[in-house]
């Protein structure tokens, strides 16, 4: 049971510092010529911030400095995404790419359901258990 927080944060780190940049450093996101330069700057900033915070969260767990803080940092990243996604209609945000497509299975966006909701629920459950 003691290894579950480490596994949860390691999974989040792989996603936020590895998988997401891999999926977004391309022509559909960071190098998208249809996006204003300012939006691309924010995209690069978001990728670097999430990767850095994820690495910090993992270091806190591996070094045994603070499991709870590591989980909270990881949760801050995933919950922020879920809130931004939930509020998308209020500011014109969407999970659709510029060409109108999305990465989905049976109409369910994989980033929202699998990547963020699962890591959020796992980390939230482990954090609550530690309280």
Image (cartoon, rainbow, N blue to C red):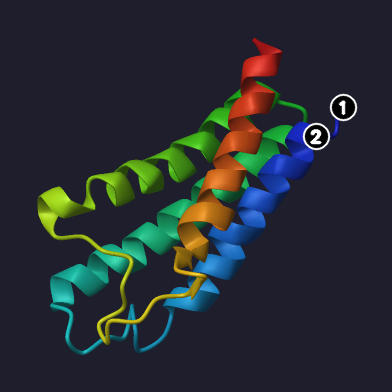
- Residue where numbered disc 1 is placed: 1
Label 1 residue SS:
loop
Q: Is residue 91 above or below residue 21?
A: above
Q: Is residue 92 above or below residue 102?
A: above
Q: Report, in whole angstroms, how far the alpha carbon at label 2 lies from the one at label 1.
A: 5 Å
Q: Position of residue 89 (x, y in %)?
A: 16, 53
Q: Position of residue 9 (x, y in %)?
A: 67, 42
Q: Which mark, residue 4? A: 2
Compared across the picture, whether 3 is left or right of 67 comes to right
Q: Quadrant of the C terminus?
A: top right
Residue 37 found in image quarter = bottom left
Compared across the picture, whether 64 is left or right of 40 comes to right
Q: For this rendering, which residue is in front, 124 or 37?
A: 124
Circle 1: is it few (<14), some (14-19), or many (20+) Cα within 10 Å? few
Label 2 residue SS:
helix
Q: Which mark, residue 71? A: none
């Amino acid at each position: 049971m003691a290894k579950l927080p480490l596994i949860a944060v390691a999974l989040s780190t792989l996603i936020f510092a590895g998988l997401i940049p891999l999926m977004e450093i391309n022509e559909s996101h960071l190098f998208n010529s249809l996006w204003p330069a300012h939006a691309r700057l924010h995209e690069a900033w978001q990728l670097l911030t999430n990767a850095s915070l994820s690495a910090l969260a993992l270091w806190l767990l591996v070094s045994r400095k603070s499991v709870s803080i590591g989980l909270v940092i990881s949760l801050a990243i995933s919950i922020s995404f879920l809130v931004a996604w939930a509020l998308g209609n209020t500011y014109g945000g969407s999970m659709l790419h510029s060409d109108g497509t999305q990465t989905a299975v049976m109409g369910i966006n994989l980033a929202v359901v699998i990547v963020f909701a699962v890591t959020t629920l796992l980390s939230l459950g482990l954090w609550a258990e530690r309280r």
